[in-house]
Image (cartoon, rainbow, N blue to C red):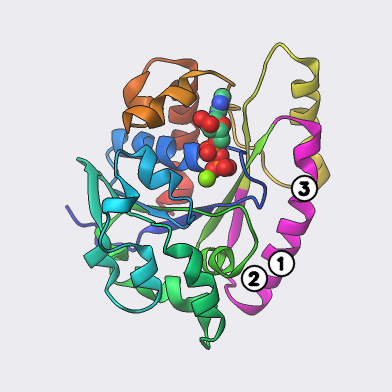
Amino acid sequence: MAGKKKAAIIALANQKGGVAKTTSVSSLGAAFAELGLTVLLVDLDAQACLTFSLGIDPDAVETSVHEVLLGQCEASEAVLKVSESVDLIPATIDLAGAEAALLTRPGREFVLQSALEEVRRDYDVILLDCSPSLGVLTLGALTASTGLIIPMPCEMLSHRGVGQLLDTVRDVRKLLNKKLKVVGILPTMYDGRARHSKEVLGDVGERYDLPVLSPPIPRTVRFAEAPAIGRSVLETAGSSKGAMAYREVAESLLPVVQA
Ligand code: ADP
Ligand code: MG
C-alpha cells in the first residue's frame, strides 16, 4: 500500500548520548505502524544500536546506510523488513568512516535527502535516528527532514546543549533546508514522583519557546529489556506505561505526519 504522498521525514536528534533517541525511534515507529502507517526507520549512528535493538546483527548486514550515503547503492537496496509495516535501513560500524568520506564531497549535507527521495512515496513516515553529535551525518539528517523531535530526559543537566542544537537548526534552515520545523521536545525518563522532573518539564518549553510533546515518557526498566529481545517496547511490554505513553505521543503527532 504505497502512499502516493511523500512521507514526512522526522529526525530525532540531540547531540547528547543516552537521551532515548534510539528508544524513541523504535517505539514511535511501532506506534505509527499500529496506527496503520507504513514506516521506514533509518539508523544514522555507527554504534548501530537501533539496528541491533530491532533484532538485526549489524555484523551480518551487507548493505547499510553507509553504502547509500556513499552512492554505492540505492536506498531501496538497503531496506530490511523488521515487521509488517516497519522497514529499516540499518547501520554498521562502517558508518564511522562515512563522515570522513563525505567531508570531501560537495553537497554532502544533501546526500541523505536525495537518497531518500527514491523511497519517500513508499512510506507514510520516515524516522531518522541520529548519532550523538552535530557532525555531517546529523546535518544531513536535518537537511533531509521536514520535522525535528528533540528527546530530552527530565533532568536539569540535559538542558545544556539544546541551545547549541537550536543554533544548528537555525543555520540549517537558513542555508540547507527551509522546510525544517521543530516539532517539539520529547520529555523522556520522566519520574512523576520527583519534584525535580516536574519542574524541568514545566520550565523547558518556555525557556526554549518550543512545544513540549505530551505525555512525557516515564522512566521504566521495560525499556532496557526490549532491545535484547530485538523488538520495541510496544511489542515486548505492550501495556506498560512506557508503551502507552509512546502510543499517545504518536497519535498526537498524526497531524504533523499527515500534513
Ligand atoms: P540515545 O539513542 O539517545 O543514546 P537510547 O535510546 O539508546 O538513547 O537510551 C539510552 C538508555 O536508556 C538505553 O539503555 C535505554 O534502554 C534506556 N532508556 C531509554 N528510555 C528509557 C525510559 N523511558 N526509562 C528507562 N530507561 C530508558
Ligand atoms: Mg542512539
Contact between marks 2 and 3 (CB within 8 A): the answer is no
* Residue at image location 30% in from the left, 62% down from the top: 5
Q: Secondary structure at mark 1?
A: helix
Magenta segment: 154-183
Q: Residues within 10 Å of mark 1 (few under 14, many from 20)?
A: some
Task: Single out the mark in the foreground, 3 or 1.
Answer: 1
Q: Which mark is residue 251?
A: none
Going by the image, does 251 lie left or right of 71? Answer: right
Give x and y (percent) for residue 227.
Answer: 40, 32
Whether residue 21 is visible to the viewer of this picture, yes or no, is: no
Q: Does 167 sit above or below residue 108?
A: above
Tell me the CA gap for discs 3 and 1: 14 Å
The residue sitting at 46% across, 58% down in the picture is 44
Q: Amino acid at mark 2?
A: Arg
Residue tagged 3: 209
Q: Nearer the viewer, residue 80 or 197?
A: 80
Task: Mark 3 or mark 1: name the one nearer the start of the chain.
Answer: 1
Classify residue 20 by image quadrant.
top right
Q: Secondary structure at mark 3?
A: loop
Is 206 in front, or is 52? 52
In the rendered structure, are the residues bearing label 1 and label 2 in contact, judged by CB atoms less than 8 Å apart?
Answer: yes
Q: Position of residue 78 (x, y in %)?
A: 26, 62
Q: Is residue 80 magenta?
A: no
Q: Which residue is mark 2?
A: 173
Q: From the viewer's perspective, is 33 left or right of 95?
A: left
Question: Quick one: label 2 or label 3, which is nearer the N terminus?
Answer: 2
Give how far apart the Cα atoms at labels 1 and 2 are. 5 Å
Toward the left, the furthest residue is 1
Q: Which kind of residue does numbered mark 1 sit on?
A: Arg
Q: Amino acid at mark 3?
A: Asp
Residue holding disc 1: 170
Is the C terminus in the top left, top right, bottom left or bottom right quadrant?
A: bottom left
